[in-house]
Image: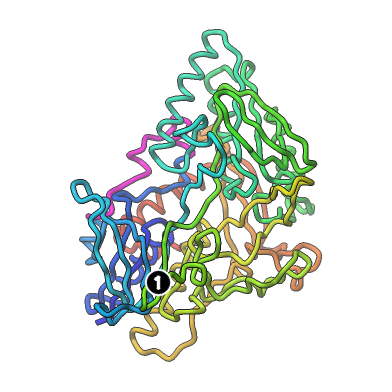
Amino acid sequence: MAKLVILGAGVAGHTAALHAKRMLGSHHDVIVVSPNSNWNWIPSNIWVGVGKMPVSKVVFPLAPVYKKKGIDFHQARAVEIHPEGSDAHQRGYVVAESTKAGQEGTREEIEYDYLINCTGPKLNFGATEGLGPEGNSLSVCTSAHAEETSKHLAAAIERIKAGEKMRFVVGTGHGTCTCEGAAFEYTFNLDFALREAGVRDKAEVVYLTNEAQLGDFGVGGLIFTQQGFQTTSKLWTESFFRERGIQAILGAHCTKVEPGVVHYEQLDGSFHELSFDFAMLLPPFRGADLKAYDREGNDISDKVFNPAGFLKVDANYAAGGYENWRAEDWPKTYQSPMYDNIFAAGIAFAPPHQISQPRTSPNGTVITPAPPRTGMPSGMIAKAVVQTIVDRVKGVGAPAHEAPMTGMGAACVASAGMSFLGGSAAAMTMHPVVPDWQKYPNTGRDLKGTSGEIGLAGHWMKHLLHVLFLYKAKARPFWWIIPE
């Protein structure tokens, strides 16, 4: 009997757990260790954050699903990995601290034959002074954050109706943030909510981002064909901002958020202040606070993880400068180079470098989006890793399954306002996610698999994805037929 331990139960971890149990059956153990008792469909937090959807529609408890499927669930936070075991453990094991009510901090040691790190991001609000719900800005990164943000928005709208004029600032709260797409979504859902409330003329909406140009989205932008004409995501996005009357501040790194004032530096080295009445600013990500130790108890964290806490995998981390970057730098199997029974999926794996061109201000401040590894790529990578492990457990002498982001297509549907008759969304596809300039020298991507459209049909697709992925995550009948 093999024991597979999965750390985390987000998109990657939950996908891995469900597929692993489906493929391995009852003869092998699948164990999930996650500090959260609920699963959250994070993309729909945007709608929660503008008051269009209750929290109950984006979360559900994990324990009943895992019990039904025969998955062993530990509501705990993994804090240590011991890949070589110890005198008391012949196999590798993880140390986890319970987050369950009444058992907080209780430690347990869980052995494994195979380990998948799907711990996702640590929301690093501390990287910018005053950033976050415990500071002076709002967030939609968790369902609780989004619910609180919606309350602030409702109060702001009432103040505008009472005669005030207000400035809304939405964007990234640090120069190395990822998830610019989420900031984009919230900006346009906010604009839609203000128009729907009849107060848009008294509200100024400002998009503050670390992107050097609109439409970068952390993937270096897109070139695609729309209605027979070739265009760029830069022009496409700029027109969207212009139509909605939204001001964009580009290449910005937030240095501090004070009550009602955000301080930021731009790529040209200049420093500015921007007053606000409402600010929703996303944090940068770090890896989970995991430590790794060898059999003798020596700390080997710096060998297993990169400086940001993400697990090193089969990537080229020595590529050097931007001019040396190649598609082959990116991982294919997501296996640890030190331990062949340890893998990472989703945000937990360490990327070799950014996807967007790196940029630094004259003051030495890095202002470049970090590479996104969320949503569709997370699920596809998790499934490929599970297939590799299943082959090995069953003794199938097949090579490791691959899911390189340099050969993977992905779709992103960014909401721009929730309404079945008046809503819209920006629907984008890209192939591959990470551009391959050697294979596609003019565009970095295959134009046949890269596209962009904005309209009501996109909103219907966004809502359909919400319904389908919650169905899939709840492991309803034939859930595995729904693609990742």
What percent of the width, then of the height, locates residue 20? 34, 71
Specify the quadrant that holds the N terminus: bottom left
- In the image, what residue occupies the spot 53% across and 36% down? 131
Q: Which residues are magenta?
A: 46-63
Q: Residue at x 57, y 11 (%)?
A: 164
Q: Is residue 176 left or right of residue 374?
A: right
- Residue 202 to residue 171: above or below: above
Residue 173, placed above or below residue 359: above
* Number of other residues with Cα within 10 Å of mark 1, as a class: few under 14, some 14 to 19, many 20 or more: some
- Residue 50 on the magenta segment: yes
Indicate the amino acid at tag 1: Tyr
Is residue 423 in view from this perspective? no
Frontmost residue, 293 versus 73: 293
Camera-side residue of 350 and 245 = 350
> Label 1, on which residue?
293
Give coordinates of residue 339: x percent, y percent.
Answer: 45, 79
